[in-house]
Amino acid sequence: FIQFIIRCALNILGLWVASRALNGLDYNNQWVTLIIASVILSLVNALIKPFVLILSLPALLLSLGVFTLLINGAMLYIVHLVYKPFEIGSFSTAILAGIVIGLVNYILTRVIDLLQAERV
């Protein structure tokens, strides 16, 4: 449960950064919208994404993993379809937002890992 909360917090920050960096991604400056969208994104990533990854394994192998960018964009677009206050202008915006969110999550996860390593 704690991991899920951490993942949601990272997604909130990632969605916020993506909304600032990209046109076409909007939460109407409502933090509640951002929080709900990040919870939905975390659930979609935990429940749906593993099946999509398995089903798209041939495309992932042929593209050497680049197809993952499309999958991440699709997961974000699902959030948009399920929760209308979270607006994504186009699928290409969703793909770019997925890249930004992935980078934010990666950087923050590394920082957290370094901080935990220093404690030990």
Image (cartoon, helix red, strand yellow):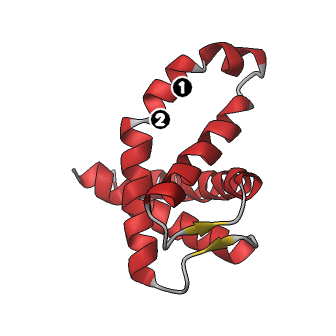
- Residue beneath disc 1: 53
| Image spot of residue 65 (x, y percent) | 70, 26
Q: What residue type is labelled 1?
A: Leu
Residue reaching furthest to the left: 1
Find residue 10 and report its horizontal and vertical position in percent: 46, 61
- Mark 2 and 1 residues: CB-CB less than 8 Å, in contact? yes
Q: Looking at the image, can residue 83 be seen?
A: yes
Please give the name of the residue rendered at 60% of the width and 59% of the height, measured from the top-left corner.
104
| Residue with the most extreme bottom position | 29
Left or right position of 5 against 12: left
Numbered label tally: 2
Residue 100: percent from left, percent from top: 68, 58
The residues bearing labels 2 and 1 have C-alpha atoms spaced at a distance of: 6 Å
Mark 2: amino acid: Lys
Q: Name the residue under label 2.
A: 49
- Dot 1: few (<14), some (14–19), or many (≥20) neighbours within 10 Å? some
User: 89 and 107: which one is in front?
Assistant: 89
Residue at 30% of width from left, 59% of height from top? 5
Residue 44's disc is none
Q: In this view, does 75 lie above or below 94?
A: above
Specify whether 48 is left or right of 58.
left
